[in-house]
Image: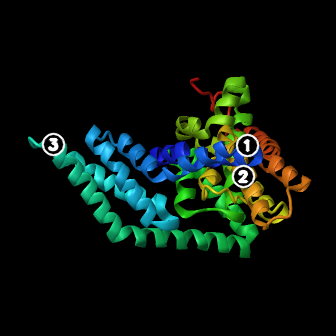
Amino acid sequence: MSAMAQGLFASLLVGTIISTLGTQFNLPVLVEVGNFAKSMSGPAMAVAIGYALKAPPLVLFSLTAVGTAANSLGGGGGPLAVLIMAIVAAQLGKLVSKKTPVDILVTPLVTLGSGTALAYLIAPAVGSVATAFGQLIKDATVLQPFWMGIIVSVLVGIALTLPISSAALCAAFGLTGLAGGAAVAGCCAQMVGFAVISFRENRWGGLVAQGLGTSMLQVPNIVKNPRIWIAPTLASAVTGPLATCLFRLEMNDPSGGVASGMGTCGLVGQIGVYSGWVNDVSTGIKAGITGMDWLGLILISIVLPAILALAFDLLIRKIGWVKDGDMKLDI
């Protein structure tokens, strides 16, 4: 899933950022480049997955068509369909790779044939289930913004810190709207939270590595002392409902949810929120970008996670659950 997220990032997400810049600065060439990148999301995901599975070259190159088919036929749940089809096709291709004298024909035929056939058979169903589940989360967040704000923020934030991909999960289920805003809040709470509460151990290098990189760096320390995870997680439980109930923070980035699971990683989450604002303004959904919008984004993304995580961490240290050195990174 991490590989799939990298494929999404290198195509759909970067393409969205480039096309948004092109729209804002009236540069049609950037819009066109961005659209090219976005159109390649299926192949990029499939090739990234194949690379992670150490697929041989012929299998890897054949996965481009598999990714295109699965992403197209999977509809709104295309990323999840690509994940399943690419894994199956890559493994079947690896089984026959270099096993026959006509490998240059057999390996691509098996990889491409199995992947696209499977895409035609089950990708629409997989996509429909993923879309329905994502819509259920989004509808529930609109109906119960407080409780769902907590649930989505905490769970997606936890996924971001674990060695799985929160961006891939958000993309697979299309977490946009208020649910996407809660997801952004949870991811920022983990990244900024860990960056701030571990500053005494890791100084500026750790602040940047976790705040703009990933809180996943703390996984080895979490294994040693799971209590270090309490402060950022409690922070996400507070910022999530604030995002949904008070600031009505929405993630309507045209990338379809991948930015919802990125947090402050390269400020992709914040760029995604801004891209959503621009898209909503251009389509008439939103009258304009207000000062309250910017205030909510800054508070939810950076200020509140830092303050809340520090406050919770001080309390946890006071009762002796966390000690100096528990969050030291090897960087």
Front disc: 1 or 2: 2
Horizontal relation, residue 24 to residue 1: left or right: right
Residue pictured at 67% horizontal, 35% vertical:
212
Which of these two is toward me, 23 or 85?
Answer: 23
> Quadrant of residue 57 in the image?
top left
- Tag of residue 275: 2
Horizontal relation, residue 285 to residue 11: left or right: right
Inspect this view and state whether residue 189 appears: no
Q: What is the C-alpha distance between the residues marked 3 and 1? A: 60 Å
Q: What is the C-alpha distance between the residues marked 3 and 2? A: 46 Å
Front disc: 3 or 1: 3
Mark 2 neighbour density, 10 Å: few (under 14) some (14–19) many (20 or more): many
Residue pictured at 26% horizontal, 52% vertical:
111
SS at badge 2: helix
Instruction: Give the residue pinned by disc 3.
Output: 103
Q: Earlier in the sequence, mark 3 or mark 1?
A: 3
Three-letter residue code for mark 2: Ser
Mark 1 neighbour density, 10 Å: few (under 14) some (14–19) many (20 or more): some
Vertically, is 236 above or below 325?
Answer: below
Inspect this view and state whether residue 247 appears: yes
Q: Earlier in the sequence, mark 1 or mark 2?
A: 2
SS at badge 1: helix
The picture places residue 140, in percent across and down from the top left corner, at 66, 74
Residue pictured at 41% horizontal, 56% vertical:
68
Instruction: Give the residue pinned by disc 1.
Output: 316
